[in-house]
Amino acid sequence: MRGMIQRVQHAKVKVNDDIVGKVNSGLLLLLGIEKDNDHAKADKLLNKVISYRVFNDGIGKINLGLTDISGELLIVSQFTLIADTRKWLRPSVSSCARKLHNKVVTGHFGANMEATLLNNWPLTFMLKS
């Protein structure tokens, strides 16, 4: 499981011109899930994301996590984070997880999505669990 977080002033995701998720100040998490990932790995990564210190404290030092600032989190499925790019000129996504069930709370698995974001200082980090 891999996640890429970006600190954002705001972000939103649209599918067929409908906004399916949006946040104001907080984090955008692009999430890649592999076939063998389980709930324990997901919990580990989520705890890391919400605690990861990427926000400024009162003296300007990057020392606060998402919960410290009462920020919001937008999670977007991004299977290409799992792609194997070591061979040829075409990424392999054979190790990516497939759709697990039909009920998705927000968004549409496998849909063409339009993501818009405004970075709050260009901070981007790759996290693994």
Image: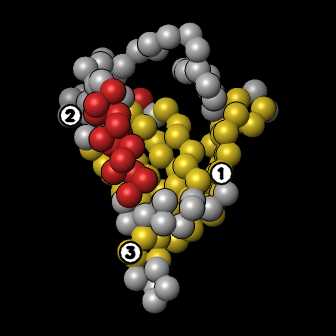
Asked whether the residues under the numbered discs 3 and 1 touch, taking CB atoms below 8 Å apart as contact, a structural biologist would say no
The mark closer to the camera, 1 or 2, is 1
Q: Residues within 10 Å of mark 3 (few under 14, many from 20)?
A: some
Q: Residues within 10 Å of mark 1 (few under 14, many from 20)?
A: some
Q: Can the viewer see residue 82 in this picture?
A: no
Query: What residue is pinned by disc 1?
Result: 23
Residue 74 placement (x, y as % from top left): 57, 45
For marks 3 and 1, give the CA distance.
21 Å
Near-viewer residue (8 or 113): 8
Q: How is the image coloured?
A: secondary structure
For marks 1 and 2, give the CA distance.
35 Å
Residue at 63% in and 29% down: 106
For marks 2 and 3, give the CA distance.
35 Å
At label 1, which amino acid type do we have?
Val
Query: What residue is pinned by disc 2?
Result: 86
Residue 44 placement (x, y as % from top left): 30, 41
For residue 42, side relative to residue 66 (left or right): left
For residue 48, side relative to residue 119 (left or right): left
Query: What residue is pinned by disc 3?
Result: 63
Q: What quarter of the picture does the N terminus occupy?
A: top left
Q: Residues within 10 Å of mark 2 (few under 14, many from 20)?
A: few
Near-viewer residue (97 or 106): 106
